[in-house]
Image: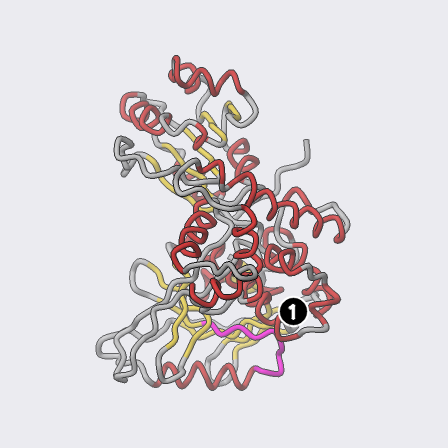
Amino acid sequence: MSEYMARVVDEAVSAALDHPVAVLLEGPRACGKSATGRHHSGSSVQLDVDQNALRLVGLDPSRVLAGARPRFIDEWQLAPELWNHVRAAVDVDDDGRFILAGSAVPADDTTRHSGAGRILRFRMRPMSLAETGRSTSEVSLAAIFAEPTTVTGSASLSVPELAETVVRGGWPGLRELPTGQVIDRLQSYLEDTARVDIPLLADEPRRDPEGVSRVLRALARSTATEVSNSAIARDASAGDTPMSNATVQNYLSALARVFVIEDQPSWGPQLRSRDRVRKAPRRHFADPSLATAAMGADADRLLNDLEYFGLVFESMVIRDLRVYAEPLGGIVRHYRDSAGREVDAIIERRDGSWMAVEIKLAESREEEAAASLKRFAANLDTARTQPPVAMVIVTGGRYAFTRPDGIHLVPIGVLGP
């Protein structure tokens, strides 16, 4: 068995399991949930492999829950009735510690208790650059949030290496494979999503696998943008058979339930300006490599299409910011108003503190990004909205430093939790 690679979520999971509680690890298939669950467990059962255990759920669920604690139950959504049994066990057992992992959200079941206070949810994603060792982690997101600081560091990733990193993605099980095989596996991943994972959701209406595949390709073409459902419908329509907006929304909901896509919601501060804040989400795959796989792109094609490279680079940065912000209680949003002011990422914490992040693949666009951040900040009504704790430009460049105007320039290859 290969050595466990530490994940950013480990510390929070360990702290949660110091008490009687159930931990729910959610995220896309193959992102490392099973390895993390086993790492923190005393015993485990894998419902997608152990058919006897799956049958036993309906006969005597207490036997499935029996074992050294914390007890890890992988792919729990195959037996959603376990949810209430786990919740009840946490209530009555002094050592009621469980870990559930699932790569799909079951259909809503009004008989299933919410689990509030007993079942803690943690979202896992494919590995960030810090987790794979591709980032030096010299610049800490938590440290920037904690207090005014200056940043310094030096990244080793060249632009061609960044392109290779994008198309390979952060999939733990694919680390040792040649890049061509990684792309083949990811294209198969998308085919399985359309033909196997989504039909296993087993709810109505039935979704056409070919239609789902067309929506995936349409999303890939417009990743990291605010593309509308109607635009996706036009792009995903086949021949004389148009796809309706309702069908697109149904497919997008299913793709979100299997964690293949994760929209980036908008942020709405109190602003002096009367310009309307736009509410459309930005569209992202769970990992930018799924977008490039859907497009059939390798690193060379990205280097020959810098506009698209910039979009998938932005998606990679958003993935990493989500991973690093999760332990801080942070949500990664975006901002855009009708006057054209926009910010690629707003990281907002529960206490209301936030930072603004612009994302540029090329270091040469530093001044453009800084000017955009300053225009945005100048339009804030600071009597009603607290100012950002920091403004950051994340690039594909080499050196990290703090500019005289206080804006941090941070290559993705030095950023960490």
Q: Quadrant of residue 31?
A: top right
- Split into 4 quadrants, where in the image is the N terminus? top right
Q: Nearer the viewer, residue 352 or 168?
A: 168
Give residue 179's position: percent from left, percent from top: 75, 53
Give residue 16's position: percent from left, percent from top: 39, 38
Residue at the image point whose x is 51% and y is 81% from the top: 369
Q: Is residue 198 left or right of residue 388?
A: right
**Residue 363 falls inside the magenta stretch:** yes
Residue at image mark 1: 154
Q: Give the vertical position of 203 relative to 338 (above or below).
A: above
Q: Nearer the viewer, residue 198 or 266?
A: 198
Give residue 91's position: percent from left, percent from top: 27, 25
**Residue 126 falls inside the magenta stretch:** no
Please give the range of residues in magenta: 357-365
Give residue 310's position: percent from left, percent from top: 60, 72
Q: Is residue 13 left or right of residue 278?
A: right
